Amino acid sequence: MKTSIERLQTTMAALRDPDSGCPWDLKQDHWSLIPYLLEETYEVVDALENGNDRELCEELGDLLMQIVFHAQIAKEQNRFTFDDIAAAIDAKLIHRHPHVFGDSTLQDEAELDAAWEQSKAAEKPAKRDSSLLDGVIAALPALMRAQKLQRRAARVGFDWPDHQGPLAKIHEETREIETELNHDSPDQQRLREEIGDLLFSVVNLARHFDIDAEDALRQANNKFSQRFRAVEQCIAETGGNIHDANTEQMEQCWEKAKRRQA
């Protein structure tokens, strides 16, 4: 009897059958599937934040389907299979956890992190022009990538000693933005760079307090969404419409929404 994952692989192979498969599935390749892979990943995150187990189970299934889809495409091209994927990650986990699967003993989280990085480094041969920043992929969300880049640099001491450094940098970048805005014709490219520097500094401040910047902004987005919906409802309750409301009305409803969330 086939396992669930084996049945899923069989289903995917049928969808990709050149003679009897689905036209949409047949025309997909690794590149065309990228938007769906990203979308499904974020839907898993959304389900986790909602705390809905049924939704989470469903979204994890959708994400797994994407992995099986990519594995099927690679199998058709004689590159690798789903079993190769599973075997590779299994071997990697065992290699990176000698304190669980070997004789090594680690005393604290710092030793664990150091051993993890040593294991990762040993898995890939060093290149002559290699950088400590190698492996922090450019496709990551910008806030997440900024935090990872900063963490990599911090490993060799390229870091502020405490949060006062990034906090002062935030003030500095804010002043530079104000200076640019005081020009009669602010330079758009210059302004973009200064705002980028400000965002990078804010991520640095978050990192010094062990706050995940991506998660913090996601929570802020959710809070804004909830409050704005409350503003729309508040205005609707008075017989108005958000499109016709003036700034004063919206501000009053916004403050009311803030008090409700406090």
Image: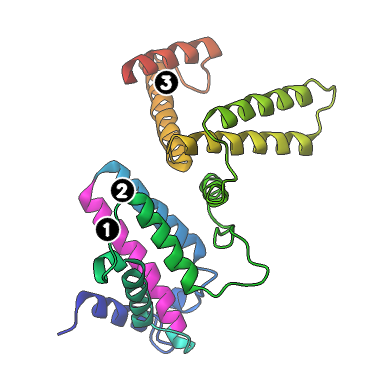
Residue at label 3? 231
In the image, 208: left or right of 52?
right
Asked if residue 253 is positioned above or below residue 113 in the image, the reply reads above
Q: Quadrant of the C terminus?
A: top left
Q: Residue at x 55, y 27 (%)?
A: 164
| Percent position of residue 79, x then y | 48, 86
Q: Are marks 1 and 2 in contact (CB under 8 Å)?
A: yes
Q: Main secondary structure of the magenta part?
A: helix
Residue at label 1? 58
Q: Amino acid at mark 1?
A: Glu
Q: Which residues are magenta?
A: 52-74
- Is residue 68 highlighted in magenta? yes
Asked if residue 208 is positioned above or below residue 131 in the image, the reply reads above
Q: Secondary structure at mark 2?
A: helix
Which residue occupies the foreground of this view, 91 or 27?
Answer: 91
Residue at label 2? 47
Q: Amino acid at mark 3?
A: Val
Q: CA distance from mark 1 to mark 2?
A: 9 Å
